[in-house]
Amino acid sequence: MKLELEIDGRIIAAEFTATNGTAQLRVGEQTHEASVSQPEPGFFVVQLNNHVFRCALEKSPSGETEVIVNGQRVPVTVQDKKRLRGIAGGSAGAAGKVSLISPMPGKIVRVMLSAGDEVAANQGVLIVEAMKMQNEVLSPKAGKVAEMRVAEGQTVNAGEILAVIE
C-alpha cells in the first residue's frame, strides 16, 4: 500500500507491506524490513537491524496520533494515497460521501461510531486488526456517519467498504 508519512514535520512517500509478522517499508530505492509483534493492544515491539524498539500509539491532546518509541514522542501522520484519490482533492473538507476502505484483510476489533453519529476530520471510526497490528481507520472529513457496514468481530477483505461518511 502506498503511503504518505509525515514524521516530525518531514513528508516521506513510502510503500508498506506486511505478512506473517514481518513489515516492509520501501522509501525510494531503499527497503527496510522489520519483525513486528503486538504483546498487548496499542503496544508494539519492532526488531530492525538488530535493534529493538518498544513502540506505543497515543492520541495527543489535539487529537493527532503520536508514536512513542523507546520513551520518545514522535508525531506521525499517515495518509493512504490510494484512499485519498477517492476524496475530492484529498481534502478533509471534501463535499459528498466518502467511503472508508479496509487497508488490508483483517478483523474489526472495535467500532467507535454508529450510523447517524457526528464525526470530526481525522477522528477514529473503527479499528482493523491484521497480523497482530491494529490499524485505526480515520474519517478524512467532518460530517456524519451515513452507513456503518461492519460490526466488531467481523472479518474484512482489503478494499472492502467499512463505513460511509457524508
Image (cartoon, grey):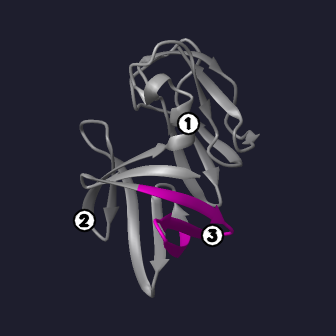
**Looking at the picture, how far across and down is residue 124, in whole percent?**
46, 34
Separation of marks 2 and 3 at Cα, in angstroms: 24 Å
Q: Secondary structure at mark 1?
A: helix
Q: Please say if the residues under marks 2 and 3 sit with CB atoms less than 8 Å apart.
A: no
Give whichever of discs 2 and 3 has the lower sequence position.
3
Residue 118's quadrant in the figure?
Answer: top left
| 58 in relation to 98, above or below | below
Residue drawn at x 52%, y 12% is 96
The residue beneath circle 2 is 72
Q: Nearer the viewer, mark 3 or mark 1?
A: 1
The residue beneath circle 3 is 21
| Crowd tier of the residue under label 2, counting other residues whose Cα lies within 10 Å: few below 14, some 14–19, many 20 or above | few
- Total numbered labels: 3
Q: Secondary structure at mark 3?
A: loop
Q: Secondary structure at mark 2?
A: strand
Q: Please say if the residues under marks 3 and 1 sit with CB atoms less than 8 Å apart.
A: no
Q: Is residue 117 left or right of residue 122?
A: right
| Crowd tier of the residue under label 1, counting other residues whose Cα lies within 10 Å: few below 14, some 14–19, many 20 or above | many
| 55 in relation to 48, above or below | above
**Looking at the picture, how far across and down is residue 54, in whole percent?**
39, 71
Q: Is residue 126 visible?
A: no
The residue beneath circle 1 is 83
Q: Is residue 137 visible?
A: yes
